[in-house]
Image: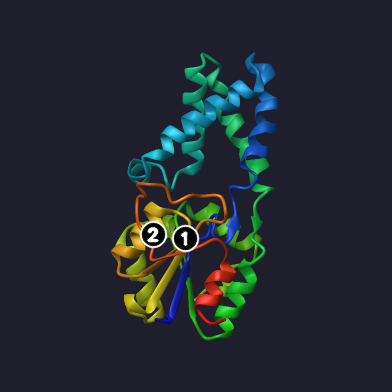
Amino acid sequence: MIPRAVFFDMDDTLLNTSGGVEASWEVVCREFAPALGCEWDTLRMAIREEMKHFWDDEAAVEREWRTRLVEAREHVIGLALNGQALDSSLASRISTRYWEENSSRIRLFDDSLETLTLLRDAGFNVGLITNGPSDMQRWKLARFGLEPYFDVLVIEGEFGHGKPSRKVFEHALAAVGAHCHEAWHVGDNLYADIGGAKAAGIHAAWIHRDRLELGESPKAIPDRVIAHLPELREALGL
């Protein structure tokens, strides 16, 4: 069934926010390793492992940290430094430098604006449902000029709830006057995007951008799997 409304996640769905992560961490770890008295790759590995452990429990992060991403990053870096018996007082400076590096590397995916434009021109209601703090997500919207493409914006730090809560999807549906069976949601996170959309009765399209795998025991099963947005356009007859 062709929907009336199409909702999108932002990070790693419309914006490539992960593509510069490794390059950013290498720059930062090379900068700080001499002061810490360690090899840069040892520092990178410690931070990577601590980050993986921290973010794996998405429900726990959702409850306490997801709208406090700057604090969360500094907290995890501090844990990594402590775990290596390194000076954890540098955690704040390392966190700030990482954001400077990584934020400069965020890019729109090549197919994002064309897809949003085609959807609007074809008469679809288009919405953005994004987790995270208001200031960070608003900064991304402004930097890439995305706000005019959407009929509704639901930002976790403003709305007070984030994906996978049904409340965010129900709010988006109400804002565009659509029922759940008349909407699709596109996102890269199985727990938040796919699990949340399906719980709300919305057709859930998982976009993996050639970097993710569904795996043997996924946190949610999508209704549709796409690698890039042209596959979504094709499914919608655009």
Left or right side of 43 for 71? left
Residue 64 found in image quarter: top left
- Circle 1 crowding by C-alpha within 10 Å: few under 14, some 14–19, many from 20: many
Badge 2 is on which residue? 194
Q: CA distance from mark 1 to mark 2?
A: 7 Å
Image quarter in which the C terminus is found: bottom right
- Determine whether 53 is above or below 167 in the image: above
Residue type at the position of mark 1: Gly
Image point (66%, 24%), residue name: 32
Is residue 166 visible from the viewing direction of this image?
A: yes
Q: Which mark is residue 220?
A: none
- Determine whether 42 is above or below 142 in the image: above
Percent x, y of residue 121: 59, 84
Residue 112 found in image quarter: bottom right
Colour basis: rainbow
Image point (41%, 58%), residue name: 193
Percent x, y of residue 218: 37, 50
Image point (36%, 40%), residue name: 57
Left or right side of 202 for 35? right
Image point (32%, 79%), residue name: 179
In contact (CB < 8 Å): disc 1 and disc 2: yes
**Which sits in the foreground, 198 or 177?**
198
| SS label for mark 2 | helix
Percent x, y of residue 24: 66, 38
Badge 1 is on which residue? 187
Q: Earlier in the sequence, mark 1 or mark 2?
A: 1
Percent x, y of residue 72: 46, 37
Left or right side of 236 for 222? left
Residue type at the position of mark 2: Ile
Number of labelled discs? Answer: 2
